[in-house]
Amino acid sequence: MRSARLKIMLAAILLSGVHVAAEEMAEAKKADPRENIDTAIADSIRLLEAKSYEEFIRNYAAPEDLKTLLAGTTMEEFVKQFAAENAAVVLKILKSVKDAKPVISADGKKATFKLKEELKPPHPELTLIKIDKYWYFEN
């Protein structure tokens, strides 16, 4: 009898652990990398290394900026231009800041990384802005 109760208790403990682990896995799958600066940069690097330029642009250009970027052109043409002219530089810049800590604005909606001059970046800083719950590149 005691053995049966012990088995039931162990089974209940194991099942509750499995349930908690399943919930944690489901929540981790729901998390979007754009919700955190570090994961946004890591995801951007992953996309650029995979040459998934359109996905990078769609995910990390701020919605209003994307409209402006695509005014007068198609996504396909813009992606071709980005691949040829900017992708390598953007990837190099992102790799250079992946372990750096940005300066966060007082309202928590802007993160700025100072860029190294030897990278010859088009801008002296890399800035991400938070719109709702996602981080996007500003420049």
Image: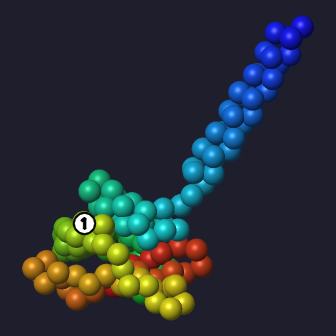
**In the image, residue 68 lies at what x, y percent?**
42, 87
Q: How is the image coloured?
A: rainbow
Report whether 100 appears left or right of 31: left
Q: Amino acid at mark 1?
A: Lys
In the displayed orientation, state which residue is furthest to the left.
118
The answer to which image quadrant residue 121 occupies is bottom left
Report whether 124 appears left or right of 45: left
- The image shows residue 39, relative to residue 115, as above or below, that is above
Q: Residue at 76% across / 22% down in the picture?
A: 11
In this rendered view, identify the residue nearer to me: 132 or 8. 8
Q: Residue at 31% across / 81% down in the picture?
A: 113
The answer to which image quadrant residue 58 occupies is bottom left
Asked whether the viewer can see residue 80, the reply is: no
In the displayed orientation, state which residue is furthest to the right.
1
Q: Residue at 30% across / 67% down in the picture?
A: 99
Q: Which residue is mark 1?
A: 95
Quadrant position of the C terminus in the picture: bottom left
Label 1: state its secondary structure: helix
Asked whether the viewer can see residue 2, the reply is: yes
- The image shows residue 12, relative to residue 43, as above or below, that is above
Quadrant position of the N terminus in the picture: top right
Report whether 139 appears left or right of 83: right
Other-residue count near label 1 (Cα within 10 Å), few / some / many at <14 / 14–19 / ≥20:
some
**In the image, residue 51 lies at what x, y percent?**
28, 57
In this rendered view, identify the residue nearer to me: 6 or 33. 6
- The image shows residue 44, relative to residue 3, as above or below, that is below
Q: Residue at 55% across / 81% down in the picture?
A: 131
In this rendered view, identify the residue nearer to me: 43 or 11. 11
**In the image, residue 90 lies at what x, y percent?**
24, 72
In the displayed orientation, state which residue is furthest to the bottom.
106
**In the image, residue 103 lies at what x, y percent?**
38, 85
Report whether 91 appears left or right of 17: left
